[in-house]
Every structure is written in structure tokens, then in C-alpha cells.
Image (cartoon, helix red, strand yellow):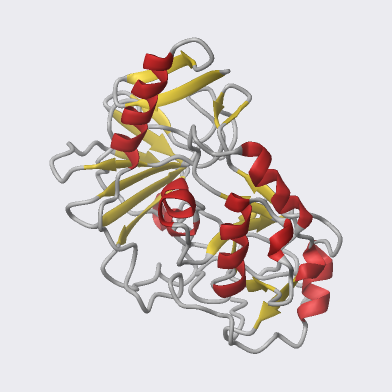
Amino acid sequence: MLLLVSGLSGWTVYDLTTDIHAAADVDEAHARLTELGDLAVFPADSIWNTPIDKLPVHPNSARLIASIGTDLPVHPDFGTVWRGAPNGIPYVVVSGAQPKVPVRFEYAHESDPGPYPIPTNAPIEGGPQGDGDRHLIVVDREHQKLYELYRAFPAGNGWRAGSGAIFDLTTNKLRPAGWTSADGAGLPIFPGLVRYDEVVGKGEIRHALRFTCQKTRRAYIPPATHFASHLADPDLPPMGLRLRLRADFDDSVLSPQARVIAQALKRFGLILADNGSNWFLSGAPNPHWNDRDLRTLKQIKGHDFEVVDTGDVVTR
């Protein structure tokens, strides 16, 4: 099995079937790049960290779910390796001493100008040659700041990107109304990722999870601040829509890693964060994920969810 790992000094391929020492090096490098310590990702009363298992069901729940796909399965959009690159949205943790570099934005009027503390060869979604969203996420542990880029490419002594956002992890401050972020909904990406250190290390996830769907409405529900559609159909989901896995779903049919995720889906639920494939659940890559285990999440179908009512829809 070949594993491609991004470190501060570049990308390295390890043959895990033949080189035990290389596998140990992967473990150490990955732990160093993703170690959050006791850093709190937004306050305890953040919408990300607040349970929604007691909130009322939205009156249009059935139609909204039908528009995403009643019989379609949840798809774990993360794992070990996919097409030669780490599978998922990676992130890197840096110290407060990390030098900052300039970033040039395509959508500068809705982006935080920076500069951003991006290490050389920081991990990019899809790998260095990736042609998708190319998200780049940096967590400054000491200053408790989150830096996120969409469509990030190295450029000279800095970077160029479609858009970017900086979040203070100590507050619940939202983006300005109508602004995007590195995500279509104007939300931060990092707090909605399924992370290995939580699922396996802690045995629980205590925050909402990010997901995508193909067709969305020209509307959003706070804490989302932005829509990414021209469609006004009220049966289409607006950005920021919250869903939860039904309490009566039997998660004993799932494998261990998937069961931890399902329990979070019941208590903290999903937040619609961007346009993409239906029921795609976002997570961070990790060489230790059990991909076969994660695939049991596909036993969860759209009809196993219900939409919860979290507030008014913004359409302007």
C-alpha cells in the first residue's frame, strides 16, 4: 500500500507494506501536523458545538430531504488515500511564530486580506496537482485563529486563491451578511470536519458536521452568510440548513468508526455548507482511517434524516 503524505518539507511516498520504519515516520509527521492540543474550536455555545437533538422538526422536512435524495446514501468524502492523494480536506497546525505570506484573491471584495501563516508546501485538498476545490486550512494554535482558502495555488513568495477567510476561534462572530468564505455558505470548514483524533482518539465528536448537496436554494440560514444558487424553489435546501439523524436509527449495524460518526449526527447533526455531491460528508484525511469501516456509513440513507428548524431563511 502506497501512502502520499504532505509535510512541511514536501510530499513523500511511503510503502507501508514493506517499510515499518517509514510507517512510523508517517505517524510522527502526521501527528505533528495535526496536533491541536486543548485548543477549543469556537466557544461552547457556538452553533457548531450546540446539540440539536431536542429542536423541533421543520414543517417542510420531507420535501427538503426529497430534494437531496430520500434513498441516496451518506458518502464519507474522506479516508486514507484516493487517486494518489490524501482523501479529504487536510489541515495543518502551526505555531504563532509561523511567518505570514501574501495572498491574492479572485473575490477580494469578500475575502479577508491577510497575510496568512501558510507553511511552505502546506497540504492542499486533492494534493499539489489537484483540480478540485483545493481548500487549504491553517490553524494557528497559539493565536487561536483559523485561516482558510478556496482554490489555493502557490504564487511567487505567496499564494493566489479564489477566496479566503480568517476566523477568531474564541468568538462566535459571523462573516458579514452576503459574504462567502472558503466555502459556499460563508461558514468555516474546519469545525465541520470528521477528524480521526476525535473519532478514534476520543471516541466521540462534539460538534456538527459539514456536508454538501447538488442543488441548493438562493437563500441561507445563519450562521451561514452566503448562498450559491439562482434557484428560488422553497423545497430546495438553503445554505446553513441543519439536519439530524433520526433518533430511532439503529447505529448498531455500523462499524465502530462509523458508529461514532452516526452518534454525532444524531446529537449535533449536519450543516449544509456548499454545493457538491448529495449527502457527501466532509472529513480530514488520516493514514489510520479504516476505509472499509467508514463505508458502512452508506447504510444511512436520506430518509434516515430529519430537518430541524433553526431560524428564519435569508433570501437577499
Residue plotted at (55% across, 33% down): 80
Q: Quadrant of the C terminus?
A: bottom right
Point out residue 116 in the picture as x, y percentages from the top left corner: 27, 43
Q: In this picture, is 158 found above or below 184?
A: above
Residue shown at 29% from the left, 71% from the top:
171
Task: Indicate left or right for 297 with 118 as reference.
Answer: right
Say which quadrant the N terminus sits in.
top right
Residue 188 pos. (x, y %): 44, 59
Quarter where residue 23 is shown: top left
Q: Is residue 298 left or right of residue 117?
A: right
| Closer-to-camera residue (143/160) | 143
Tell whether 102 sits left or right of 3: left
Q: Position of residue 107 (x, y in %)?
A: 46, 49
Q: Which residue is depicted at the point 56% across and 74% down?
A: 267
Residue 220 can be seen in this image: no
In the picture as drawn, the residue positioned furthest to the right comes out as 71
Position above or below: 155 against 53:
above
Residue 28 in the image: state x and y as whole percent.
31, 29
Residue 133 visible in the current orientation: yes
* Figure quadrant of residue 264: bottom right
Residue 26 in the image: above or below residue 141: above
